[in-house]
Image (cartoon, coloured by chain):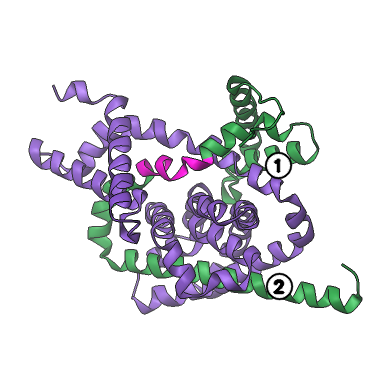
Chain colours: A purple, B green
Amino acid sequence: MTAALATPFTGIFISLLVYLLGMWLFKISKGFFLFTPLLVGVVLGIFILALWAKGIGSTTVEVYKKFFLPGGNIVFWFLNPATIAFAIPLYRRNDIFKKYWIDVVLTLFVGGFISLFGIHMVSKLFGLSKVSIAAMLPQAATTAVAMPIAKSIGGDPAVTAMVCIINAVIIYALAEFLIKFFKLKEISKVGLGLGLGTSGHTVGSAKAVQLGSIQGAMASVSVVIVALAMDILVPIYARLFL
Amino acid sequence: MKKDGKKETPILIQMGIFMAILFVAQLLSQLFPPSFAVPTPLIGMIILYILLATHIIKLEQVEKLGDSLIGLIAFLFVPSGIQLAGSLDLIKREGLQDVIVTIISTIILLVVITYVGSFFIKLHQKINNRKGDD
């Protein structure tokens, strides 16, 4: 009976179930920030897998690989065309990109470098190992870019993958709160778009699209440019300061 | 999104465009060395942007599928999040510091990039005003 569950349907069903439960909780809690569908879905999904593992006397990782991953991979695959789609909000505000492209590139390189410094300092403050620090540095880039960078500077790519996922989940859950707390809405639409795309990757960009067309366009383009910026900056930073 | 007279491209054709771009993008992605990874979806996004900007592809030929996919992205990310179940051992080994540092780093990125961005935009506007154009 367990073998019958090791099909893609299981993972797809669990993904949908937990996300829909998240949407329902978000609705009945009138938008409580800790009940964003993504965060609820992830926590609930891991909880289900852990319970499942307990039930059959296996480990969570084992259950995840055997029962969730086949379906999870199928859902995950759709992130490919979804990422491409961000060219659309960018093109819709091509006027803004044409006007400010120099600013965008400068922001992501200069701001990216400052952030590297900040991330490095916080990592040191918490006493992370060198391997973990190296894994933290490239997190502004999307997972597929950040992992090989981390590896090339001696970091653990598995930690980097985890970090990039947490980035997205945190931004999706906390963006509204953080924007209010740091008064980011008031200072610049272009800046906020870049910030959301950099910190939350494509999920942050989706959030930015909801805020407005300028924010959405800037977040979309930042995902590409910050990936290139990290490709260039992180190895240099690592050579200088690690 | 389209409720005016413009004809909407059939969804199968929109899918065809997306897949053609991904197909080409994966070939281009392999040209980059592992030390300078540029993944397929990012190249695909650049290709679609260029095709739109050069009017080879029109907005209505991709926007219905594209907007739906963007609207779904939080859901599409659920399996990536659940992937953390596979990292539970890693978190146990490394301790919770990694998670805390990541959360702080996320906030650093959001705040720093937003402020640096607004700084450059304001600088840009000031220079333009002085020149008297724009």
Q: Residue at x 55, y 55 (%)?
A: A208
The part of the chain drawn in magenta is B70-79
Q: Position of residue A68 (x, y in %)?
A: 28, 34
Q: Quadrant of residue B116?
A: bottom right
Does residue A113 appear anywhere in the picture? no
Magenta highlight: main SS? helix
Residue bearing mark 1: B49
Please state which amino acid type lies under the numbered disc 2.
Phe
Q: Position of residue A42 (x, y in %)?
A: 30, 48
Q: Residues within 10 Å of mark 2 (few under 14, many from 20)?
A: some
Compared across the picture, whether A242 is left or right of B83 comes to: right
Q: Quadrant of the N terminus of chain A?
A: top left
Compared across the picture, whether A65 is left or right of A1 comes to: right
Q: Chain of mark 1?
A: B
Q: Chain of mark 2?
A: B
**B84 above or below B99?**
above
**A16 above or below B12?**
below
Please state which amino acid type lies under the numbered disc 1.
Tyr
Q: Quadrant of residue A60?
A: top left
Does residue B76 appear anywhere in the picture? yes
Compared across the picture, whether B13 is left or right of A67 comes to: right
Residue bearing mark 2: B120
Q: Position of residue A75 (x, y in %)?
A: 40, 34
Q: Is A166 within the magenta?
A: no
Q: Residue at x 72, y 28 (%)?
A: B6
Helix, strand, or loop for circle 1? Answer: helix
Q: Is B71 within the magenta?
A: yes
Gap in angstroms between the C-alphas marked 1 and 2: 24 Å
